[in-house]
Amino acid sequence: MYNRLLLLPDLRELLDADDASGVAGFCEALHPAAVAEVLEGLEANESWRVLSSCTPERQAEIFSFFDLPDQLELVETVPRESFSRLIEEMAPDDRVDLLERLDPERVENLLPMMASAERRDIQKLLSFPDDSAGSIMTTEYASLPAEATAAEAIERLRQQAPDRETIYYVYVIDEGRRLRGFVSLRELILARPETRVESIMERDVISVRVDDDQEEVAQRLARFDFLAIPVVDAHNQLVGIVTHDDAMDVAQEEADEDAYRSGAVVPLQDDYLSTSLVTLAWKRGGWLVVLLFASVLTAMALQSLSDDLESLAWMVLFIPLVLASGGNAGSQSATLIVRALAISQIERRETIQVLLRELVLAGLLGGGLAILSFAVAMGFVDSMAKAAVVGITVFLVVAMGTVTGAMLPLGFKRMGLDPALMSNPLIAAVVDVVGVIIYYNVAKIMVVGG
């Protein structure tokens, strides 16, 4: 923010003076991310005036640091020929992210203006399913034949480097582009010049399939602490790589989705301020309607018990305490389990272990809260029996909420659904309905006499 406020007036002066060389120098002097930050203070047409003063390579570098909504706004002002050149210079995975958000007809009109190799690459990447390894990979990887010597390999890498995303991992392929191994740049530099690549390469290659889920790819990359991981097809042919920065983006995206769903909000595609009010209302309203009907079930449960409520009017005092205790416990369990599932801390075979742990926790938490609730209730009611109703109900509701909050996300996972769909408000709503029934029946048994 400081850089933008400091440098924006100077940039505006250059634009007002129509000093194209000065604008180009401005863009070259700063890091591309810093230039993009400054351009956030300009209108889209002004931003393009700045970018059009740069070389296509510099344009793409700066453009890649724009948020996707800002990119979409900017391309509306860019002439088609200039846009096609910009797309050609972008990293394959970045340009596919952008093209997927554009109108398909515009993309079709744009593709014929690109070089055939770039066009084929874009069409291939666009064909992969959303959220798959193929949709986030880049095809700009370094490769070598196994027969090359270390000296030949370094010379080849010198030629490949300008057009590759990374050259620190070099993949060894055969004539059919099947993945045979990989070698690091460090190993090539330390090897004797006459040493063949096949004698120093790692043959046990950890790779992912092109149709693997992107979240699993990001987790594998993080687990092995790689800079990049190769992506292969069904025939073990190398088709691309997923780099650590793309994996970080995926991890952030998945964490954002889980956070939204845990609050009963459909995940946003863009940031909060870039999302229209209509879209926000739609994404929030759907869940609110579901939760409204869940609350109606609570009201129906209370109505079905209305015949005995006159004699149990004192119970109304403790309904918030009872239901909040169960809902909060359930939300805690759901949050812990959803997070553990998201980072692969829990496997399917460990479901029973999770259940047993939650049962023990349910006893500990429920017992502790029950004692406190009993003590609080004694200050409001005229008998130990009534206070005991509150304490016992809190124990049962907290135990039920704890186990339910843990098991429902696991059940969703087993059915192939996103565990995060079991949001905290929904868990609380389920606990409310059951909690009312438990509360009434405990009171009926202990106070009314069955």
Image (cartoon, helix red, strand yellow):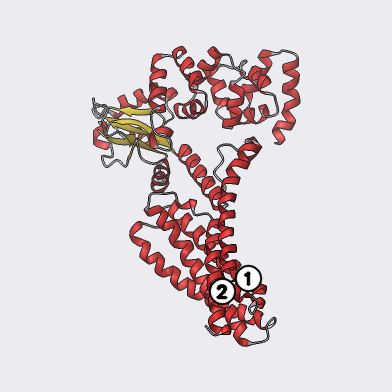
- Near mark 1 (Cα within 10 A), the count class, few <14, some 14-19 or many ≥20, is some
**Residue ID at (50%, 20%):** 87
- Quadrant in which residue 59 is drawn: top right
Residue named by callout 2: 439
Q: Is residue 196 above or below residue 406?
A: above
Residue type indicated by callout 1:
Ile
Q: How many marks?
A: 2
Of mark 1 and mark 2, the one earlier in the sequence is 1
- Quadrant in which residue 30 is drawn: top right
* Picture quarter with the N terminus: top right
Residue type indicated by callout 2:
Tyr
Q: Is residue 349 above or below residue 249?
A: below
**Residue ID at (45%, 52%):** 419
Q: Which mark is residue 11?
A: none
Camera sees residue 140: no
Whole-percent x, y for residue 20 in the image: 67, 13
Whole-percent x, y for residue 305 in the image: 57, 71
Is there a contact, CB below 8 Å, between mark 1 and mark 2? yes
Q: Is residue 310 above or below residue 60?
A: below
Q: Which mark is residue 319?
A: 1
Whole-percent x, y for residue 346 in the image: 39, 58
Whole-percent x, y for residue 121 in the image: 39, 22
Camera sees residue 165: yes
Q: Nearer the viewer, residue 448 or 80?
A: 448
Q: CA distance from mark 1 to mark 2?
A: 8 Å
- Quadrant in which residue 271 is drawn: top right
Q: Left or right: 262 with respect to 144?
A: right
Q: Nearer the viewer, residue 440 or 91?
A: 440
- Near mark 2 (Cα within 10 A), the count class, few <14, some 14-19 or many ≥20, is many
Q: Is residue 287 above or below residue 306?
A: above
User: Element type at marker 2?
Assistant: helix
Q: Left or right: 41 with respect to 248?
A: right
